[in-house]
Amino acid sequence: MAAFGDEVLDALVSGRDIVWSDVAAEIAAYERQLTDTYRSIRVRAMLNIPISRHGVSEAFLYVHQHHRREWRFEQVLLAREIAERTWANIERLRYQQELSGVNERLRLVLEASNMGTWDWDLITDTIEWSENLQKMLGYEPGTINPTFDLWKETLHPDDRDYALGQLEQARRDELYDVAFRINRRDGAIRWFSTKGRFFRDKLENPVRMVGVVEDVTEVKKTELDLRESEERFRLIVENAKDYAIFTTDGDGKIDSWPPGAQATFGWAPNEVLGREADFLFIPEDRNNDVPEIEFSSALENGFAPDVRWHQHKDGSRVFIDGSVWPLHQANGSFKGFLKIGQDVTQRREAEIALRNSEERFRKLTATVPHLVFRSTTQGERIWASPQWAEYTGMSDKDSVGLGWLEAVHPDDRQLALKKWDEAASGDAYYGEHRIRRHSDGMYRWHQTRAVLLPSDSGKPDEWVGSAVDIHDIRQLQERQGVLVAELQHRTRNLLGIIRGIVAQTAAGDAMGPFREAFNLRLAALSRVQGFLVRDKAMAVSLRELITSELDALGADWEQVTLQGPQIPLSDINLQTLALALHELSVNAFKHGALSGAGGRLAITWRLAPTEGGEMLVIEWREDFPLPRVNTETVSTGFGRQLITEALPYQLGAQTQFSLKSKGLLCVIEIPFQGTHAR
């Protein structure tokens, strides 16, 4: 460059344009010896336009002519424009060469990570989308011509202004980092996260922008789900009034106090925030360092139970069933504690009351001379009193379940279980069986009774009962039964003797009606005696008593209707009632419904509730086959007297006896003494 002269060199270094119309004239003024140099390269007129960046000349544009030329001003400006444009293209090519290697490596990485890239040439306004980006937008690679307008169309309408506004901001700040929604070609909406950068020329004009795009739809969905989850959690915590949920910082000071905590402990948020949480513990626990032990255990084990009494603002105590959990930051560092608990004071007090009740029950049963037990509906023992263990020699472990049957006589075991099956349909158990006495091995009769305990819905049924030694009483009853049977046998023999004496005494036709009536009444009395000596387990029912009387007289059952429940009768009212029914039956055969064809006898009975208990109501209704002309003959007979006088006197009955020409209605109401209808 020195061969062209110092003037040229200084102009190039300083960035000044050289505009010479005649080189020889310019040089002749100060360095005539350079004329030959320019003449040798045939330069007569020239333009030298320097290209500078940041005050430093990096290149120049040289224009010359072999003859003299006057350069116009607009020609100089054109040369300057050509120089700038030419150098800008050279720089772009240089950038492309520098980035070609990086782009190839980046392309491989992006394809592996399913990300897309874009390259926007702002000078030519052309955009290149990577194959992955085209696929992400729903296009087959190579089937579209990417443009800036097409990119704008893919933006979700609600995010378009935001994305374009951030792009304009990036033109000034250079970096573009934004997330927005796009509409795929198939109509699906996806979330894109894009990061890009503007590249500038030497004049700081943006000439190119490149960036990467990542589909973050799943991430956004996770973030949305997380926000919704956090919102649900917040709503749950704020509305869980039955739970005390709050947090503390690392020093144990309360930093959150939802409504549930206030409802449980009574303090408002402004009264507790910033206070150490140990004030919630009762004084005894604070004196024993329970708060510190609880927090230390939570840190060591990941959580700690918090099931104990706590302090309420009003001075009372609440029992909390809960736990304490350590909280950590995202980087794993300790943050504080989370305490969750439910107020179960009522349940706790009920448990304490139950334990006290059970203890009182155990102490009470220890003083009762019976074998007390608790059982399931299936007869499986849950618990037995100490008296059971002492009497049978069987421990609780041996007696639970069906183990208690080992102490029952082998012949009675099935009966004992059958009684439990029968009790399952009601609320009471009754049975008698023999139990072995450990002291001498003797099997003694016991009477066992049990009742169903009330329980909450869903809990297994539980029974409580006791077994009483009735062995001696049973032997006395058996002895009494033998004596009664012997007495009844002798009574029936005596009735037979009386019947024979009457037959001999009342011989003759004139005494015939008397003998017949007397024999029938003795026969009815004899049948009652037979009922009385039966086994107590075979109680006589009202239906059986009526049937026996009508059968004894040879009733035609086509004329008779019986209707009523199965009612067992007690020995107290059996004999007198049987004689009354006998008189009604005999009169029905002689004068009433059963005296001829066409008559009807309907007998009904029921149990009617009264203020003092129950009444047995018997209705005896006859429809005579023929009208009776004279009804006065029975107005003072033995049967009617027995019904209207003897029954009220002996049984406290109320009776109604209505005899008409066409029929009879007799109503007997007796205070019921016996078991309920089955």
Image: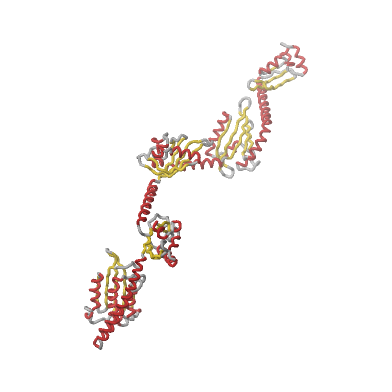
Residue 580 location (% of width, % of height):
27, 75
Query: Can residue 579 be seen from the camera position used here?
Result: yes
Query: With 56 as the anchor, is 402 left or right in this view?
Result: left
Task: Residue lying at the far top in this picture: please name it.
Answer: 30
Residue name at image x 67 percent, y 35 percent:
105
> Above or below — where is 573 with respect to 11?
below
Residue 10 location (% of width, % of height):
68, 16
Q: Quadrant of residue 422?
A: bottom left
Q: Quadrant of residue 647?
A: bottom left
Task: Residue lying at the far bottom in this picture: please name it.
Answer: 508
- Label count reads 0
User: Which quadrant does the N terminus fall into?
Assistant: top right
Residue name at image x 37 percent, y 66 percent:
471
User: Which quadrant does the C terminus fall into?
Assistant: bottom left
Q: Nearer the viewer, residue 579 or 608?
A: 579
Residue 502 location (% of width, % of height):
26, 84
Q: How is the image coloured?
A: secondary structure
Residue 84 location (% of width, % of height):
66, 25
Q: Nearer the viewer, residue 550 or 392?
A: 392
Residue name at image x 40 percent, y 60 percent:
391
> Above or below — where is 124 with respect to 321?
above
Query: Can residue 240 be seen from the camera position used here?
Result: no
Q: Nearer the viewer, residue 29 or 200?
A: 200
> Above or below — where is 126 with respect to 188?
above
Q: Nearer the viewer, residue 489 or 218?
A: 489
Residue name at image x 61 percent, y 32 percent:
209
> Above or below — where is 127 with respect to 22?
below
